[in-house]
Amino acid sequence: MDDCLSRHHAYENRLMRKAHTVSTHSYTRAGLTLDEILPDRRKDLQEQAADRLLAMEILSCLTETERQMVHLKADGLTYREIAERLSTTVGSINGRFHRMRVRLMGMDF
C-alpha cells in the first residue's frame, strides 16, 4: 500500500500536473493581463504568420516530388529514408535538395 501511495503522490506532484494556465481575459494574482505579461506575443504571432505565408509561397515553387521530399525531411527522415520511400538513390535526393537550395536562393522573396 505504501508503494501505491508513493506512486500516486509522485504522479500528482509532477511538474506537468502543476502547470500554470492563463486566460487571455483573466488577470493573474499580480493583477496583470496576458498582454502585460507577454508584450511581444502579438508581434510573435504576426512573425509566425508571415513565416508561414513565406513557406507556402516557397512550397508553391516546387514540384510535387520536391514538396514530398521537403515534407519528409521536415518529419525528420534522413536522405536514405527519403530515397527508400521515393524509390530512388541517396545521391539523387542529395542532388535534388542541392538544386532546390540553389534555385530558392536565386529567388527574390
Image (cartoon, grey):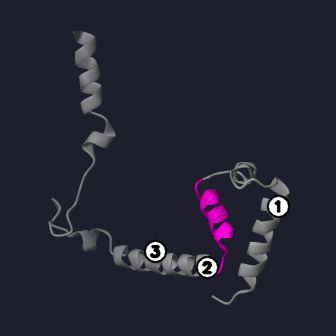
Is residue 60 toward the left or the right of residue 2 in the image?
right
For the C terminus, the image quarter is bottom right
Mark before the other along the chain sequence, 1 or 2:
2
Q: Residues within 10 Å of mark 1 (few under 14, many from 20)?
A: few
Q: Position of residue 83 (x, y in %)?
A: 75, 53
Residue drawn 59% across the image and 80% down it: 60
Q: CA distance from mark 3 to mark 2?
A: 15 Å
Confirm or deny contact between disc 3 and disc 1 (CB under 8 A). no
Q: Give the residue number, with chain letter if any, for mark 3.
A: 48
Mark 1, secondary structure of its residue: helix
View extreme (bottom): residue: 108
Q: CA distance from mark 1 to mark 2?
A: 21 Å
Q: Residues within 10 Å of mark 3 (few under 14, many from 20)?
A: few
* Closer to viewer: mark 3 or mark 2: 2
Q: Position of residue 84 (x, y in %)?
A: 73, 49
Q: Give the residue number, with chain letter if any, for mark 2.
A: 58
Q: Which residues are magenta?
A: 61-75
What is the number of the mark on residue 71?
Answer: none
* Closer to viewer: mark 1 or mark 2: 1
Depth check: give the residue in front, 29 or 85: 85
